[in-house]
Structures are given as C-alpha cells and as structure tokens.
Image (tube, grey):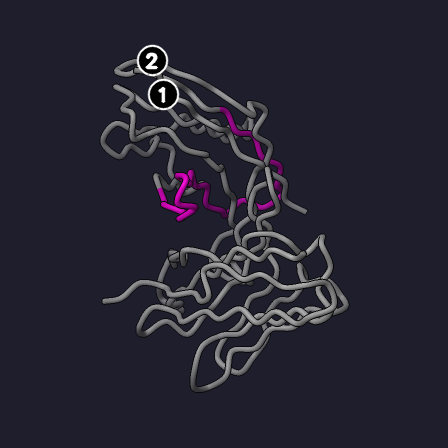
Amino acid sequence: NAGVMQNPRHLVRRRGQEARLRCSPMKGHSHVYWYRQLPEEGLKFMVYLQKENIIDESGMPKERFSAEFPKEGPSILRIQQVVRGDSAAYFCASASISGRAVYNEQFFGPGTRLTVL
Amino acid sequence: AQTVTQSQPEMSVQEAETVTLSCTYDTSESDYYLFWYKQPPSRQMILVIRQEAYKQQNATENRFSVNFQKAAKSFSLKISDSQLGDAAMYFCAYRRGQGGSEKLVFGKGTKLTVNP
C-alpha cells in the first residue's frame, strides 16, 4: 500500500508566478490536511478537505491561496502570485476517518519544498 | 486556541545515554491526543508516540516513553539508550478528540544531536 505521495518534491518559482502542489492520499483515504513549515518552525495547519468539500480552512491565508480535493485525482494546493515569504515546505497528510473510530491517524507525505526567487 | 510550547530549541545527548525533551500545551478541552513526531534531515514526518488524554498510563514505544502530567499540561518525551539515528528535529503536537477538523497543532521543535 503506497504511502502519501506529493509532487513535485522541489519547486522553484519566480515572484508573481503560480505554484501548484499535488497530494495523492493513501489508498482508501478520503481526508486530506495541508500544513506549511517555514524555516526553523514547526508545521502549521492550513486547510482540511474531504472529497469535493473544504471542511476547515482556518489556517489558509485569505488571499492567493486555494485548495481543492476533487472527486477524482489528487488534492491541489494552489498559490497565486507567489512572494518570497511563501518559500517553505508544504506537507500533506491523509486520514481515513470513521465515525466509529476513536483515533484516526494522519499519515504524512514527504513534503514539497517551494523556493521563490 | 490551543497552543504547544517546546522550550528547548536544541538538546544534545551522548550515544547510549538518556535524554528528555520537554513540551507544554494549553487547552480547555478534556478530550484530546498528544503526539511526538520525529523529522530527520529527509524532512519526512514520523510518528514516534501517541498519548490519549483519557489514559492515565504513560505511553511507551520501545526506547521512547512519555511523562504525561495532565493537570500540569506537560508532555515530555524520554529517549533511552540514545542512538545516532535518533538525531533529528522532534515536534510535540496536540489534537482535539474525536470530532471537528482534528487538525494537528505543533510546537516549534527541538533539535536533538546525538554525540558518538
């Protein structure tokens, strides 16, 4: 069973360009979380999605950032008009959440390191 | 809002010795989970150990154990018989109990160096 996959692993963009980060959850998982890790910091929650729905976007910057998790295909985190401050590692995690389960572990992908020149 | 604080930016330990990493948290919830994650230079997040708040017994996983003090909101990680492969960033994390978005709240991390 393949783990959580993220691509690309490294992404370089110039200021003003768009960045698209992809996350394929583990097989059978329908819940995806995105986290951002700035240099020398811990991971910070950005957004939580289920298939075709955004459940919690309380950590997403109000402008330039968007996320989706379509019925088919990977989850996408999109950053428009990138700035140098967007340089960070972006991690996604997936989970299979059951109403009966007491605990639903999040499995992390390897991350995408975004560098904005 | 919940917060997680790791007061030790860096720690070091001699190989085969024991080290304890500190973590405190703040929450008004009664049902929650606490975690320690390891992040080696590869940046992959690896779950080390998990503690359910309703359990009084401290969790253990081989050489890793926690000291969970619920009243003090303290959750420290003890690594026994430290090995070179334990060198990494260690993050303490909090998650509310079942229900809601179940997002993880992380501390800023402790960089652990293991000296041969």
Residue B30 is one of the magenta-drawn residues: yes
The span from disc 1 to disc 2 (Cα, nearest Å) is 6 Å
Respond whether the residues carrying marks 1 and 2 are from the same subunit: yes
Residue plotted at (29% across, 32% down):
B60
Q: Quadrant of the C terminus of chain A?
A: bottom right
Residue plotted at (27% across, 66% down):
A2
Q: Are marks 1 and 2 in contact (CB under 8 Å)?
A: yes
In the picture, measured across the screen, residue B3 lies left or right of residue B60, that is right
Earlier sequence position, callout 1 versus callout 2: 2
Disc ID at residue B100: none
Q: In front here: A50 or A36?
A: A36
Q: Residue B4, how many percent across, how many down?
A: 59, 37
The type of residue carrying mark 1 is Val
Q: Residue B54, how many percent across, how many down?
A: 42, 41
| Residue topped by disc 1 | B114
Q: Secondary structure at mark 1?
A: strand
Q: Secondary structure at mark 2?
A: strand
Q: Is residue A32 visible?
A: yes
Residue range highlighted in magenta:
B22-47
Q: Quadrant of residue B39?
A: top left
Density class for disc 2 (Cα within 10 Å; few <14, some 14-19, many ≥20) is some
Q: Is residue B105 above or below residue B82?
A: below
Image mark 2: chain: B
The type of residue carrying mark 2 is Gln
| Residue topped by disc 2 | B14
Q: Is residue A92 above or below residue B109?
A: below
Image mark 1: chain: B
Residue B23 is one of the magenta-drawn residues: yes
Q: Residue B44, how many percent across, how many down?
A: 39, 48
